[in-house]
Image (cartoon, rainbow, N blue to C red):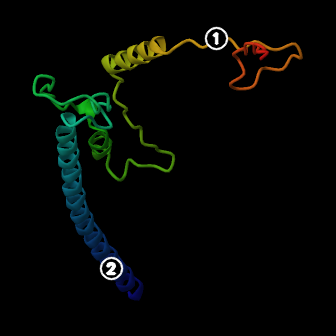
Amino acid sequence: MSTEAEGKALYEGARKDLVNALMKRKEIDKQLAALESQIYTFEGNYLTETTNSGGNIIQGFESYLKHPNAANRKKYEITDGDRIFSNIVNGDADRSADDVGVGSHVTVAVPAARQGSEARSIDSRRDRDSKQKKRPNNQRDDEGTPPLAGTTRKKRPRMDTED
């Protein structure tokens, strides 16, 4: 009979530990949900505040040096593809703690590159390159060594003045 009493005491102790652990898990889940909500709002605030002030890490900084005027500003709506941190958090929220294994890994969704901004940057580089002066090819002298900097122009011989 003493083994039954010991077994029952162990069972009750394990049951209390389980109840405490489940309550602690609920509390941590609430804290996690609050933190996810904060991340979502902070990220939204960042994206909306920086869109018209020159750029951000998502949209790029192409318009940072341009003069801001009301005609150039567009109303920008934040999409789920723009949210990097919120997408990471929301992607893992569907999995429970039991589903996470030793070999599991997290996949991060990266938003697709914007064709317009890439095309603009390529065009601006091409324009800048075409505006630069083409440099003449440095010709080698008779010894086979390239000329020194600043010696590409030939000097005219001095005229002798006899007085």
What is the residue that sits farthest to the right in this orientation? 143
Residue 136 figure quarter: top right
Q: Tell me which residue sits at (31%, 34%) in the image.
A: 58
**Number of residues whose C-alpha sits closer than 10 Å to that of mark 2, classed few (under 14), some (14–19) or many (20 or more):** few
Q: Is residue 92 above or below residue 162?
A: below
Where's residue 77, x and y in %? 15, 29
Q: Tell me which residue sits at (27%, 63%) in the image.
A: 25
Q: Observer-nearest residue: 137 or 152?
A: 152
Indicate the amino acid at tag 1: Pro
Element carrying mark 1:
loop
Which label lies toward us, 1 or 2? 1
Residue 138 figure quarter: top right
User: To which residue does mark 1 refer?
Assistant: 136
Q: Tell me which residue sits at (21%, 29%) in the image.
A: 67
Element carrying mark 2:
helix
What is the residue that sits farthest to the bottom in this orientation? 2
Quick one: quadrant of the N terminus? bottom left
Q: Please give left or right for residue 162 compared with residue 91 in the image.
A: right
Where's residue 141, x and y in %? 83, 14
User: To which residue does mark 2 refer?
Assistant: 13
**Number of residues whose C-alpha sits closer than 10 Å to that of mark 1, classed few (under 14), some (14–19) or many (20 or more):** few
Indicate the amino acid at tag 2: Gly
Q: Observer-nearest residue: 13 or 118?
A: 118
